[in-house]
Image (tube, helix red, strand yellow):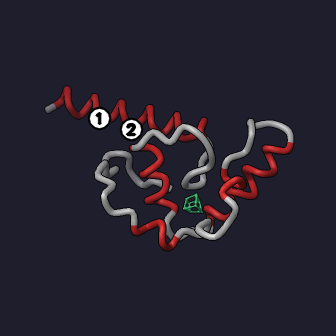
Amino acid sequence: MLTTLTSLRTNWNDLDWREDATCRDLDPDLFFPIGVTGGAVDQIEHAKSFCRACPSLEQCLEFAITTNQEYGVWGGTTEDERRILRREWRAKIRRDRIAS
Ligand code: SF4
């Protein structure tokens, strides 16, 4: 999981982390459940189980937060979980700008 929200990179010219992704050869549909209830709950947990074993988890989550990936499981998080992290990250950026 992210250790700090202050150090998120925003330049994503280098996407090499995708080469090591655990999901690279999996069906992408697994990571894009329809909804968040019913059968989608099991699907989300199944997707997250691959994320937990993924060497690219941190980069994937950073990418999803900084590039506004709205849907699906990225970096072991759902869209709702990322929305919270994104809000915290943006608030931190605003506080840093005000303080400088
Ligand atoms: S963290 Fe999850 S979604 Fe991201 S690359 Fe790894 S397996 Fe795929």
The one nearer the camera, 74 or 92, is: 74
Task: Say which quadrant the C terminus sits in.
Answer: top left
| Above or below, 91 relative to 59 | above
**Which quadrant holds residue 14?**
bottom left
At 67% from the left and 66% from the top, the residue drawn is 26
Q: Which mark is residue 12?
A: none
- Is residue 3 shown left or right of residue 31? left
**Outermost residue toward the bottom?**
20
| The quarter of the picture showing ligand 1 | bottom right
Q: Are marks 2 and 1 in contact (CB under 8 Å)?
A: yes
The one nearer the camera, 91 or 77, is: 77
Please rate how many residues cluster around mark 2, counting C-alpha atoms within 10 Å: few if below 14, some from 14 to 19, many from 20. some
At 43% from the left and 59% from the top, the residue drawn is 59
Residue 60 location (% of width, % of height): 48, 57
Residue 51 location (% of width, % of height): 61, 61
Please rate how many residues cluster around mark 1, counting C-alpha atoms within 10 Å: few if below 14, some from 14 to 19, many from 20. some
Kind of residue at disc 2: Trp
At 81% from the left and 50% from the top, the residue drawn is 42
**Outermost residue toward the top?**
98
- Is residue 43 shown left or right of residue 64? right
The one nearer the camera, 3 or 54, is: 54
| Above or below, 52 relative to 92 | below
Kind of residue at disc 1: Ile
Q: How many marks?
A: 2
Q: Which mark is residue 89?
A: 2
| Above or below, 93 relative to 3 | above
At 44% from the left and 32% from the top, the residue drawn is 87
User: Is label 1 in a helix, a strand or a loop?
Assistant: helix
Mark 1 = which residue?
93
- The CA span between labels 2 and 1 is 6 Å
User: Is label 2 in a helix, a strand or a loop?
Assistant: helix
Residue 33 location (% of width, % of height): 72, 45
